[in-house]
Amino acid sequence: MYRLLAALSLCLATAAFADPIDVDDNSTNQTLRCEGNDVTVNGNSNNITLAGECPTVTINGNKNQIAIDAVGKLSVPGNNNQVSWARAIIKGKKPTISNPGSHNQIAQSRAGGAAARAAADATDAAQATTNAAAAAMEAAGVGGLGVVRSGSGSKSSGSSASSGSGSDSGETIGILQGNLKKTFDCGEGKDVNIQGGDNELTFTGECGTVNVAGGHNVVRLESAEAINVMGTGNTVTYRSGSPSANIVGKNSSVKKEK
């Protein structure tokens, strides 16, 4: 009995400290690990993959495509969403599913679970490579590129994980996802860390250090103090100033606009 109570207390403690994940972005591609955390999707037109065990997933937004590895409770108050789940958290028991929204498609897809896990593993591997390159550049004396923590969903309890569509921490603009076309304001000296690929990004204002670790990005800067390019096939241009440039990635370039 004592062991049972101890195990129950541990489960309750874990649940009490669970850090829910809130996705408030629109039109993003994100791969997230639930790791026992609840997920709420408030944004619209996202393509989201959720790996691992997600106790509760709530989709308030509209026109999202969401693939879930394992779920306990699924609720879709939003409209026109396409949701697939691979398995229930409790083996042999289907998840609790409620669909108060309109025109949602909810279906089980066992293959989707394997795809979710593979996507999460690929994301982790890409970030590990980026962090290793960042450490190497810092060791070589190229400053300004900090190691970026894994994860692309914004967490409600103040996590340092960057938002999929680009999070502005006050000093650094971090971009993890790909296929984004957006304009950001560096203000007066914000640093920029780009880990995603195939983005078309414009930065106004006076950027500090701009680090491009992802591949095949087109980056337009108004001005910057320093530009470090580690990814492959990136094109970086700036309008004014004379930033220092360090190019490690193949087929990447840094040029001043004519």
Image (cartoon, grey):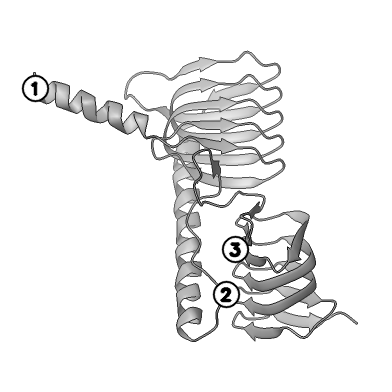
Q: Mark 1 = which residue?
A: 2
- Amino acid type indicated by mark 3: Gln
- On screen, residue 204 versus residue 129, left or right, reads right
| Vertical position of residue 51 compared to residue 140: above or below | above
Quadrant including the N terminus: top left
Residue at 48% x, 57% y is 149
Could you tell me which secondary element the residue under label 3 belongs to? loop
Q: Which residue is mark 3?
A: 195
Which quadrant would the C terminus be assigned to in this image? bottom right
| Mark toward the start of the polypeptide (2 vs 1) | 1
Q: Residues within 10 Å of mark 3 (few under 14, many from 20)?
A: many
Residue 204 locus on image (x, y percent)? 81, 64
Q: Residues within 10 Å of mark 2 (few under 14, many from 20)?
A: some
Query: Residue 243 bears which disc, if any?
Result: none
Q: Earlier in the sequence, mark 2 or mark 3?
A: 2
Residue 58 drawn above or below residue 213: above
**Three-letter residue code for mark 1:** Tyr
Which quarter of the figure has residue 142? bottom right
Q: Secondary structure at mark 2?
A: loop
Location of residue 250 in the rendering, given as x and y in whole percent from the top left corner = 62, 81
Quarter of the image where one finds residue 58: top right
Name the residue at 63% across, 78% down. Answer: 228
Query: What residue would you read off at disc 2?
Result: 144
**Front residue (pair 11, 64):** 11
Residue drawn at x 63%, y 19% as measured from the top left: 77
